[in-house]
Image (cartoon, rainbow, N blue to C red):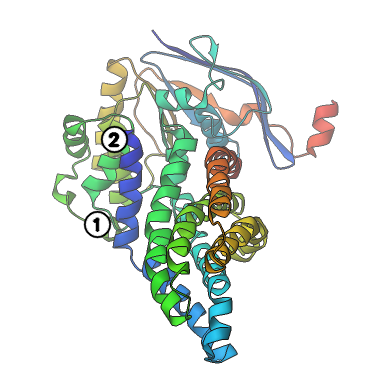
Amino acid sequence: MTLFQGQGLVCVRGEHMVFRGLDFELSSGGALVLIGPNGAGKSSLLRLMAGLLKPYDGKLLWDGEDALDDFDEHGAHLHYVGHHDAVKAVLSVSENIKFWAELRGGGEDGIAEALATFDIKHLYDTPGQFLSAGQKRRVNLARIIAAPAPLWLLDEPTTALDKATIKRLEAAIQKHRDGGGMVVLSTHADVDMPGSEVLDVSRFATRNTAFDEQVMV
Amino acid sequence: MSIFITLIKRDLNLAFRQGFDSLMVVAFFVIAVVLFPLGVGPEPNTLARIASGTIWVAALLSSMLSLERLFQTDYDDGSLELLALSPVALEITVLAKVTAHWLTTGLPLILTAPLLGVLMQLPNEGFMTLLIALALGTPTLSLIGAVGAALVLGSRRGGVLLSLLILPLYIPVLIFGVSAVEAALGDLATRPHLLILAGLLAATLALTPWAAAAALRQALE
Protein backbone atom coordinates (compact mmCIF):
# COMPACT_ATOMS: atom_id res chain seq x y z
CA MET A 1 0.00 0.00 0.00
CA THR A 2 1.52 3.25 -1.12
CA LEU A 3 0.47 6.64 0.11
CA PHE A 4 1.17 9.88 -1.73
CA GLN A 5 0.27 13.06 0.12
CA GLY A 6 0.59 16.79 -0.14
CA GLN A 7 0.20 18.96 2.93
CA GLY A 8 -0.30 22.71 2.90
CA LEU A 9 1.23 23.15 -0.52
CA VAL A 10 1.90 26.69 -1.63
CA CYS A 11 2.81 27.41 -5.23
CA VAL A 12 4.39 30.67 -6.35
CA ARG A 13 4.98 31.46 -10.02
CA GLY A 14 6.96 34.62 -10.66
CA GLU A 15 5.47 37.31 -8.42
CA HIS A 16 2.10 35.63 -7.96
CA MET A 17 0.83 33.02 -5.61
CA VAL A 18 -1.12 30.47 -7.64
CA PHE A 19 -2.65 28.53 -4.77
CA ARG A 20 -2.00 27.93 -1.11
CA GLY A 21 -2.96 25.57 1.67
CA LEU A 22 -3.62 22.76 -0.77
CA ASP A 23 -3.85 19.25 0.69
CA PHE A 24 -4.37 16.00 -1.16
CA GLU A 25 -4.07 12.33 -0.38
CA LEU A 26 -3.84 9.43 -2.75
CA SER A 27 -3.35 5.76 -2.01
CA SER A 28 -2.85 2.65 -4.12
CA GLY A 29 -5.60 2.25 -6.70
CA GLY A 30 -6.76 5.83 -6.21
CA ALA A 31 -7.37 8.50 -8.79
CA LEU A 32 -7.55 12.25 -8.49
CA VAL A 33 -9.09 14.51 -11.10
CA LEU A 34 -7.91 18.11 -11.07
CA ILE A 35 -10.44 20.61 -12.33
CA GLY A 36 -10.57 24.39 -12.45
CA PRO A 37 -10.56 27.20 -14.98
CA ASN A 38 -7.49 28.10 -17.06
CA GLY A 39 -4.71 29.41 -14.87
CA ALA A 40 -6.09 27.88 -11.68
CA GLY A 41 -2.85 25.98 -11.21
CA LYS A 42 -3.66 22.46 -12.40
CA SER A 43 -0.47 22.16 -14.43
CA SER A 44 1.56 23.80 -11.67
CA LEU A 45 0.20 21.30 -9.15
CA LEU A 46 1.11 18.39 -11.42
CA ARG A 47 4.62 19.75 -11.96
CA LEU A 48 4.90 20.26 -8.24
CA MET A 49 3.84 16.65 -7.62
CA ALA A 50 6.46 15.53 -10.13
CA GLY A 51 9.15 17.50 -8.33
CA LEU A 52 9.85 19.71 -11.34
CA LEU A 53 8.59 22.69 -9.36
CA LYS A 54 9.61 23.23 -5.79
CA PRO A 55 6.75 24.10 -3.44
CA TYR A 56 7.16 27.52 -1.82
CA ASP A 57 5.85 25.96 1.36
CA GLY A 58 4.27 22.70 2.41
CA LYS A 59 5.26 19.09 2.13
CA LEU A 60 5.08 16.35 -0.44
CA LEU A 61 5.13 12.93 1.20
CA TRP A 62 5.68 9.48 -0.31
CA ASP A 63 4.78 6.80 2.24
CA GLY A 64 5.19 9.40 4.95
CA GLU A 65 8.68 10.42 3.90
CA ASP A 66 9.64 13.67 2.21
CA ALA A 67 9.41 12.90 -1.52
CA LEU A 68 11.70 15.74 -2.55
CA ASP A 69 14.62 14.54 -0.45
CA ASP A 70 15.86 12.39 -3.29
CA PHE A 71 14.84 13.84 -6.63
CA ASP A 72 15.92 10.82 -8.68
CA GLU A 73 14.17 8.33 -6.43
CA HIS A 74 10.94 10.30 -6.64
CA GLY A 75 11.37 10.42 -10.41
CA ALA A 76 11.44 6.62 -10.46
CA HIS A 77 8.04 6.56 -8.73
CA LEU A 78 6.23 8.42 -11.44
CA HIS A 79 5.42 9.01 -15.08
CA TYR A 80 4.68 12.55 -16.14
CA VAL A 81 2.83 13.49 -19.31
CA GLY A 82 3.01 17.23 -19.90
CA HIS A 83 1.99 19.58 -22.69
CA HIS A 84 4.90 18.55 -24.92
CA ASP A 85 5.02 15.09 -26.38
CA ALA A 86 8.81 14.60 -26.37
CA VAL A 87 8.68 12.72 -29.66
CA LYS A 88 11.89 13.11 -31.67
CA ALA A 89 11.23 13.89 -35.32
CA VAL A 90 14.09 11.80 -36.70
CA LEU A 91 13.51 8.72 -34.53
CA SER A 92 10.88 6.13 -35.39
CA VAL A 93 7.93 5.48 -33.08
CA SER A 94 9.51 2.30 -31.75
CA GLU A 95 12.88 4.00 -31.15
CA ASN A 96 11.18 6.84 -29.32
CA ILE A 97 9.31 4.50 -26.98
CA LYS A 98 12.24 2.13 -26.60
CA PHE A 99 14.58 4.88 -25.42
CA TRP A 100 12.28 6.02 -22.62
CA ALA A 101 11.56 2.42 -21.64
CA GLU A 102 15.27 1.55 -21.47
CA LEU A 103 15.94 4.50 -19.18
CA ARG A 104 13.56 2.93 -16.69
CA GLY A 105 14.59 -0.65 -17.28
CA GLY A 106 11.56 -1.59 -19.39
CA GLY A 107 11.87 -4.56 -21.76
CA GLU A 108 10.51 -5.71 -25.11
CA ASP A 109 7.30 -7.08 -23.55
CA GLY A 110 6.41 -3.70 -22.12
CA ILE A 111 7.02 -2.01 -25.47
CA ALA A 112 4.83 -4.52 -27.31
CA GLU A 113 2.07 -4.02 -24.75
CA ALA A 114 2.40 -0.24 -25.03
CA LEU A 115 2.08 -0.34 -28.83
CA ALA A 116 -0.99 -2.55 -28.57
CA THR A 117 -2.64 -0.46 -25.84
CA PHE A 118 -2.74 2.67 -27.95
CA ASP A 119 -3.08 0.94 -31.32
CA ILE A 120 0.13 2.25 -32.89
CA LYS A 121 1.68 -1.04 -34.03
CA HIS A 122 1.24 -0.02 -37.66
CA LEU A 123 3.35 3.09 -36.99
CA TYR A 124 6.28 1.02 -35.66
CA ASP A 125 8.84 2.32 -38.18
CA THR A 126 7.29 5.70 -38.91
CA PRO A 127 9.57 8.63 -38.06
CA GLY A 128 8.18 11.11 -35.54
CA GLN A 129 8.04 13.92 -38.06
CA PHE A 130 5.23 12.24 -40.03
CA LEU A 131 2.93 11.78 -37.03
CA SER A 132 -0.19 13.83 -36.44
CA ALA A 133 -0.71 15.62 -33.12
CA GLY A 134 -2.99 12.83 -31.90
CA GLN A 135 -0.54 10.13 -32.94
CA LYS A 136 2.30 11.91 -31.13
CA ARG A 137 0.16 12.05 -28.02
CA ARG A 138 -0.48 8.30 -28.34
CA VAL A 139 3.26 7.65 -28.58
CA ASN A 140 3.79 9.76 -25.48
CA LEU A 141 1.11 7.82 -23.61
CA ALA A 142 2.51 4.50 -24.83
CA ARG A 143 5.80 5.49 -23.19
CA ILE A 144 4.20 5.29 -19.72
CA ILE A 145 2.87 1.79 -20.36
CA ALA A 146 6.22 0.52 -21.64
CA ALA A 147 7.95 0.79 -18.26
CA PRO A 148 5.87 0.60 -15.09
CA ALA A 149 5.78 3.30 -12.40
CA PRO A 150 3.24 3.49 -9.57
CA LEU A 151 2.16 7.10 -10.07
CA TRP A 152 0.88 8.62 -13.29
CA LEU A 153 0.71 12.39 -13.55
CA LEU A 154 -1.25 13.26 -16.67
CA ASP A 155 -1.65 16.89 -17.68
CA GLU A 156 -4.63 17.10 -20.06
CA PRO A 157 -3.84 13.71 -21.59
CA THR A 158 -6.89 13.77 -23.86
CA THR A 159 -5.66 16.73 -25.91
CA ALA A 160 -5.78 15.85 -29.63
CA LEU A 161 -7.06 12.33 -28.94
CA ASP A 162 -10.07 10.89 -30.76
CA LYS A 163 -12.95 9.27 -28.86
CA ALA A 164 -11.78 5.72 -29.47
CA THR A 165 -8.35 6.50 -28.05
CA ILE A 166 -9.84 8.23 -25.02
CA LYS A 167 -11.68 4.95 -24.36
CA ARG A 168 -8.35 3.12 -24.66
CA LEU A 169 -6.77 5.57 -22.23
CA GLU A 170 -9.61 5.04 -19.75
CA ALA A 171 -9.12 1.30 -20.00
CA ALA A 172 -5.35 1.67 -19.49
CA ILE A 173 -5.93 3.85 -16.43
CA GLN A 174 -8.39 1.32 -15.01
CA LYS A 175 -5.88 -1.48 -15.53
CA HIS A 176 -3.14 0.59 -13.90
CA ARG A 177 -5.37 1.28 -10.88
CA ASP A 178 -6.45 -2.35 -10.61
CA GLY A 179 -2.78 -3.20 -10.33
CA GLY A 180 -2.38 -0.80 -7.40
CA GLY A 181 -1.28 2.22 -9.37
CA MET A 182 -2.25 5.84 -8.74
CA VAL A 183 -3.37 8.45 -11.24
CA VAL A 184 -3.59 12.22 -11.05
CA LEU A 185 -5.15 13.77 -14.11
CA SER A 186 -6.12 17.27 -15.10
CA THR A 187 -8.81 17.68 -17.68
CA HIS A 188 -11.42 19.90 -19.29
CA ALA A 189 -13.01 17.04 -21.18
CA ASP A 190 -14.77 14.14 -19.54
CA VAL A 191 -12.62 11.21 -18.69
CA ASP A 192 -14.50 8.36 -17.15
CA MET A 193 -12.73 7.14 -14.05
CA PRO A 194 -15.01 5.34 -11.61
CA GLY A 195 -14.42 6.04 -7.95
CA SER A 196 -12.09 8.96 -8.51
CA GLU A 197 -11.91 11.99 -6.29
CA VAL A 198 -12.28 15.47 -7.72
CA LEU A 199 -10.07 18.32 -6.60
CA ASP A 200 -11.07 21.82 -7.64
CA VAL A 201 -7.75 23.65 -7.65
CA SER A 202 -9.43 27.06 -7.93
CA ARG A 203 -10.77 26.64 -4.37
CA PHE A 204 -7.23 27.21 -3.14
CA ALA A 205 -6.55 30.09 -5.49
CA THR A 206 -5.55 33.39 -4.02
CA ARG A 207 -6.73 36.70 -5.41
CA ASN A 208 -4.43 38.25 -7.96
CA THR A 209 -2.82 40.61 -5.50
CA ALA A 210 0.90 41.06 -5.30
CA PHE A 211 2.70 38.17 -3.72
CA ASP A 212 4.34 40.26 -1.00
CA GLU A 213 1.03 41.40 0.43
CA GLN A 214 -0.20 37.83 0.68
CA VAL A 215 2.85 36.75 2.59
CA MET A 216 2.38 39.62 5.00
CA VAL A 217 -1.21 38.66 5.76
CA MET B 1 26.73 2.08 -17.17
CA SER B 2 24.47 0.56 -19.84
CA ILE B 3 22.07 3.47 -19.33
CA PHE B 4 24.99 5.86 -19.86
CA ILE B 5 25.67 4.17 -23.19
CA THR B 6 21.96 4.23 -24.10
CA LEU B 7 21.97 8.00 -23.53
CA ILE B 8 25.09 8.52 -25.63
CA LYS B 9 23.74 6.31 -28.43
CA ARG B 10 20.51 8.28 -28.57
CA ASP B 11 22.33 11.59 -28.90
CA LEU B 12 24.72 10.23 -31.54
CA ASN B 13 21.78 8.80 -33.40
CA LEU B 14 19.99 12.15 -33.32
CA ALA B 15 23.15 14.01 -34.35
CA PHE B 16 23.81 11.77 -37.35
CA ARG B 17 20.23 11.70 -38.55
CA GLN B 18 19.38 15.34 -38.26
CA GLY B 19 22.39 16.11 -39.92
CA PHE B 20 24.97 18.51 -40.50
CA ASP B 21 26.10 19.69 -37.08
CA SER B 22 29.49 18.00 -37.09
CA LEU B 23 30.03 18.80 -40.71
CA MET B 24 29.21 22.45 -40.07
CA VAL B 25 31.60 22.62 -37.13
CA VAL B 26 34.46 21.15 -39.16
CA ALA B 27 33.69 23.39 -42.12
CA PHE B 28 33.71 26.45 -39.90
CA PHE B 29 37.00 25.32 -38.34
CA VAL B 30 38.64 24.93 -41.75
CA ILE B 31 37.31 28.20 -43.14
CA ALA B 32 38.28 30.18 -40.04
CA VAL B 33 41.88 28.92 -40.25
CA VAL B 34 42.10 29.36 -44.01
CA LEU B 35 41.22 33.03 -43.61
CA PHE B 36 44.52 33.69 -41.83
CA PRO B 37 46.92 32.94 -44.70
CA LEU B 38 44.66 35.11 -46.85
CA GLY B 39 44.72 37.88 -44.29
CA VAL B 40 48.35 37.96 -43.18
CA GLY B 41 49.92 36.79 -46.43
CA PRO B 42 51.51 33.49 -47.44
CA GLU B 43 54.94 34.15 -45.89
CA PRO B 44 55.90 30.73 -44.35
CA ASN B 45 57.75 32.10 -41.31
CA THR B 46 54.88 34.36 -40.29
CA LEU B 47 52.38 31.55 -40.70
CA ALA B 48 54.50 29.08 -38.74
CA ARG B 49 54.73 31.55 -35.87
CA ILE B 50 50.95 32.04 -35.59
CA ALA B 51 49.97 28.47 -36.57
CA SER B 52 49.25 26.97 -33.14
CA GLY B 53 47.46 30.06 -31.87
CA THR B 54 45.27 30.29 -34.95
CA ILE B 55 44.31 26.63 -34.85
CA TRP B 56 43.45 26.82 -31.16
CA VAL B 57 41.36 29.97 -31.47
CA ALA B 58 39.49 28.51 -34.43
CA ALA B 59 38.92 25.28 -32.48
CA LEU B 60 37.54 27.27 -29.54
CA LEU B 61 35.11 29.19 -31.71
CA SER B 62 33.93 26.20 -33.70
CA SER B 63 33.38 24.00 -30.66
CA MET B 64 31.16 26.78 -29.32
CA LEU B 65 29.12 26.90 -32.50
CA SER B 66 27.03 23.82 -31.75
CA LEU B 67 26.81 24.24 -27.99
CA GLU B 68 23.57 26.18 -28.03
CA ARG B 69 21.76 23.12 -29.34
CA LEU B 70 23.16 20.83 -26.66
CA PHE B 71 20.06 21.11 -24.44
CA GLN B 72 17.85 23.44 -26.48
CA THR B 73 16.09 20.85 -28.67
CA ASP B 74 15.39 18.59 -25.69
CA TYR B 75 14.13 21.60 -23.76
CA ASP B 76 11.80 22.68 -26.57
CA ASP B 77 10.13 19.31 -27.15
CA GLY B 78 9.73 18.37 -23.49
CA SER B 79 12.35 15.61 -23.49
CA LEU B 80 14.46 17.45 -20.95
CA GLU B 81 11.68 17.30 -18.34
CA LEU B 82 11.40 13.56 -18.84
CA LEU B 83 15.18 13.14 -18.68
CA ALA B 84 15.19 15.08 -15.41
CA LEU B 85 12.38 12.89 -14.04
CA SER B 86 14.01 9.63 -15.04
CA PRO B 87 15.64 7.55 -12.30
CA VAL B 88 19.02 8.34 -13.83
CA ALA B 89 20.77 11.19 -12.02
CA LEU B 90 20.63 14.35 -14.12
CA GLU B 91 24.40 14.74 -13.67
CA ILE B 92 24.95 11.43 -15.47
CA THR B 93 22.60 12.52 -18.24
CA VAL B 94 24.57 15.75 -18.63
CA LEU B 95 27.83 13.84 -18.79
CA ALA B 96 26.41 11.52 -21.45
CA LYS B 97 25.17 14.44 -23.53
CA VAL B 98 28.54 16.17 -23.26
CA THR B 99 30.33 12.97 -24.30
CA ALA B 100 28.10 12.68 -27.35
CA HIS B 101 28.69 16.35 -28.12
CA TRP B 102 32.44 15.87 -27.93
CA LEU B 103 32.30 12.77 -30.15
CA THR B 104 30.39 14.68 -32.81
CA THR B 105 32.30 17.98 -32.63
CA GLY B 106 35.56 17.71 -30.66
CA LEU B 107 36.78 14.52 -32.27
CA PRO B 108 36.29 15.72 -35.87
CA LEU B 109 38.20 18.89 -34.92
CA ILE B 110 41.15 16.85 -33.69
CA LEU B 111 41.12 14.80 -36.88
CA THR B 112 41.07 17.90 -39.08
CA ALA B 113 43.75 19.78 -37.15
CA PRO B 114 46.84 18.10 -38.73
CA LEU B 115 45.63 19.10 -42.16
CA LEU B 116 45.33 22.69 -41.06
CA GLY B 117 48.77 22.42 -39.43
CA VAL B 118 50.20 21.65 -42.85
CA LEU B 119 48.34 24.58 -44.36
CA MET B 120 49.69 26.89 -41.65
CA GLN B 121 53.29 25.69 -42.15
CA LEU B 122 53.43 24.30 -38.60
CA PRO B 123 56.93 22.78 -38.14
CA ASN B 124 56.98 18.99 -37.89
CA GLU B 125 57.96 18.93 -34.19
CA GLY B 126 54.67 20.59 -33.26
CA PHE B 127 52.16 18.11 -34.72
CA MET B 128 52.17 15.43 -32.06
CA THR B 129 51.93 17.94 -29.24
CA LEU B 130 49.14 19.81 -31.00
CA LEU B 131 47.12 16.61 -31.26
CA ILE B 132 47.67 15.63 -27.63
CA ALA B 133 46.86 19.14 -26.46
CA LEU B 134 43.66 19.19 -28.52
CA ALA B 135 42.69 15.74 -27.24
CA LEU B 136 43.03 17.02 -23.67
CA GLY B 137 41.60 20.45 -24.33
CA THR B 138 38.49 19.89 -26.46
CA PRO B 139 36.65 17.72 -23.87
CA THR B 140 37.24 20.54 -21.37
CA LEU B 141 35.68 22.97 -23.84
CA SER B 142 32.58 20.78 -24.20
CA LEU B 143 32.26 20.40 -20.42
CA ILE B 144 32.55 24.11 -19.68
CA GLY B 145 30.23 24.80 -22.59
CA ALA B 146 27.56 22.55 -21.10
CA VAL B 147 27.26 24.82 -18.05
CA GLY B 148 26.82 27.83 -20.29
CA ALA B 149 24.32 26.04 -22.53
CA ALA B 150 22.29 25.03 -19.46
CA LEU B 151 22.37 28.56 -18.04
CA VAL B 152 21.09 30.28 -21.19
CA LEU B 153 18.20 27.82 -21.70
CA GLY B 154 14.95 29.60 -22.26
CA SER B 155 16.52 33.01 -22.80
CA ARG B 156 16.19 34.81 -26.11
CA ARG B 157 19.39 35.39 -28.05
CA GLY B 158 20.94 32.58 -26.05
CA GLY B 159 23.71 32.15 -28.61
CA VAL B 160 25.29 35.55 -28.09
CA LEU B 161 24.89 35.34 -24.33
CA LEU B 162 26.46 31.91 -24.42
CA SER B 163 29.63 33.15 -26.11
CA LEU B 164 29.93 36.00 -23.62
CA LEU B 165 29.62 33.55 -20.73
CA ILE B 166 31.81 30.82 -22.08
CA LEU B 167 34.68 32.39 -24.02
CA PRO B 168 36.36 33.96 -20.95
CA LEU B 169 36.31 30.54 -19.29
CA TYR B 170 38.02 29.03 -22.33
CA ILE B 171 41.10 31.23 -21.86
CA PRO B 172 43.12 28.84 -19.64
CA VAL B 173 42.68 26.03 -22.17
CA LEU B 174 43.80 28.37 -24.94
CA ILE B 175 46.87 29.58 -23.03
CA PHE B 176 48.17 26.15 -22.10
CA GLY B 177 47.14 24.56 -25.38
CA VAL B 178 49.17 27.09 -27.33
CA SER B 179 52.10 27.13 -24.91
CA ALA B 180 52.40 23.32 -25.13
CA VAL B 181 52.87 23.54 -28.89
CA GLU B 182 55.23 26.51 -28.54
CA ALA B 183 57.32 24.51 -26.07
CA ALA B 184 57.54 21.62 -28.53
CA LEU B 185 58.70 24.00 -31.25
CA GLY B 186 61.30 25.58 -28.96
CA ASP B 187 62.59 22.13 -27.97
CA LEU B 188 61.44 22.61 -24.36
CA ALA B 189 59.57 20.20 -22.11
CA THR B 190 55.90 19.95 -23.14
CA ARG B 191 54.92 17.78 -20.19
CA PRO B 192 54.11 20.54 -17.68
CA HIS B 193 51.75 22.25 -20.14
CA LEU B 194 50.03 19.01 -21.02
CA LEU B 195 49.72 18.11 -17.35
CA ILE B 196 47.98 21.40 -16.65
CA LEU B 197 45.59 20.71 -19.54
CA ALA B 198 44.93 17.28 -18.06
CA GLY B 199 44.36 18.90 -14.68
CA LEU B 200 41.86 21.33 -16.20
CA LEU B 201 40.07 18.38 -17.77
CA ALA B 202 39.95 16.49 -14.47
CA ALA B 203 38.64 19.52 -12.61
CA THR B 204 35.92 20.33 -15.15
CA LEU B 205 34.95 16.65 -15.37
CA ALA B 206 34.36 16.63 -11.63
CA LEU B 207 32.61 19.99 -11.30
CA THR B 208 30.70 20.94 -14.44
CA PRO B 209 28.13 18.09 -14.55
CA TRP B 210 26.83 19.23 -11.16
CA ALA B 211 26.76 22.87 -12.16
CA ALA B 212 25.03 22.12 -15.47
CA ALA B 213 22.47 19.82 -13.80
CA ALA B 214 21.65 22.51 -11.24
CA ALA B 215 21.20 25.06 -14.03
CA LEU B 216 18.93 22.65 -15.93
CA ARG B 217 16.72 22.11 -12.87
CA GLN B 218 16.46 25.87 -12.55
CA ALA B 219 15.50 26.18 -16.22
CA LEU B 220 12.75 23.57 -15.83
CA GLU B 221 11.03 25.34 -12.92
Instruction: Check disc 2 and report the residue beneath it.
Output: A101
For this orientation, the residue located farthest to the left is A122
Is A73 located above or below residue B66 in the figure?
Answer: above
Quadrant position of the C terminus of chain B in the picture: top right
In the picture provided, is A37 more to the left or to the right than A208?
A: left
Tell me what residue is drawn at x 28 percent, y 46 percent: A96
* Disc assigned to residue A127: 1
Instruction: Identify the subunit bearing mark 2.
Output: A
First of labels 1, 2 by sequence position: 2
Mark 1: secondary structure: loop
Is A127 located above or below residue B36 in the figure?
Answer: above
Crowding near the residue tagged with mark 1, few <14, some 14–19, many ≥20 C-alpha atoms within 10 Å: some
- Locate residue B54, reporting x and y percent: 56, 74
Q: Amino acid at mark 2?
A: Ala
Tell me what residue is drawn at x 19 percent, y 45 percent: A120
Q: Which sits in the foreground, A2 or B8? A: B8
For this orientation, the residue located farthest to the front is B187
Q: Amino acid at mark 1?
A: Pro
Residue B125 visible? The answer is yes
- Locate residue B167, reporting x and y percent: 63, 61
Instruction: Identify the subunit bearing mark 1.
Output: A
